[in-house]
Amino acid sequence: MQVANLFVVRLIEYKQTKNLNMSKLMLSSLLHPEEPALEVHHYHETLWEDDKAMDQFTDIDEMIALIKESREAYP
């Protein structure tokens, strides 16, 4: 996907669990094509409503575990 003639965003990997989605994206600059692409990990907790506090934190523990796993795999 090209964004405003500035960036190219490619979806590399997508994982989905019960209440958590993780996307791995590659972000490349069209203005500076010599620059290396950036890898972005995006985490989305599907039950966490905007402007609300969570009632249970078991899903947060799952998110933290995924982030730790991702950091170990891609230092």
Image (spheres, rainbow, N blue to C red):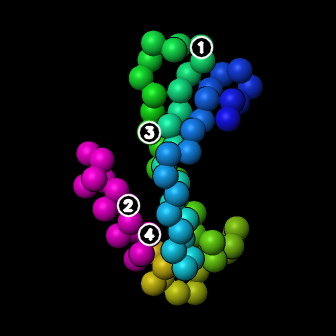
Residue where numbered disc 3 is placed: 39
The mark that comes first in sequence, 4 or 1, is 1
Q: Residue at x 38, y 66 (%)?
A: 66
For the residue pair 41 and 14, the one nearer the viewer reads as 14
Give the CA distance from mark 2 to mark 3: 14 Å
Proximity of marks 2 and 3: CB atoms separated by less than 8 Å: no
* Magenta region includes residue 65: yes
Residue at 50 percent of width and 37 percent of height:
26
Q: Distance between the Cα atoms at labels 2 and 1? A: 30 Å
Q: Which residue is mark 1?
A: 31
Q: Which residues are magenta?
A: 61-75
| Residue, disc 4 | 63
The amino acid beneath tag 3 is: Glu
Q: Earlier in the sequence, mark 3 or mark 4?
A: 3
Q: Which mark is residue 67?
A: 2
Task: Please tell me whether residue 41 is drawn above or below residue 21 in the rendered image.
Answer: above
Instruction: Check whether the beta carbons of the residues at disc 1 and disc 3 lie within 8 A of each other.
Output: no
Vertical relation: 17 (above or below) 35: below
Amino acid at dot 2: Ile
**Rounded to the nearest whole Å, what is the CA distance between mark 4 and mark 2?**
6 Å
Q: Secondary structure at mark 1?
A: loop
Q: What SS does tag 4 mark? A: helix
Residue at far right of view? 4
Query: Can you say which quadrant of the picture contains the N terminus?
Result: top right
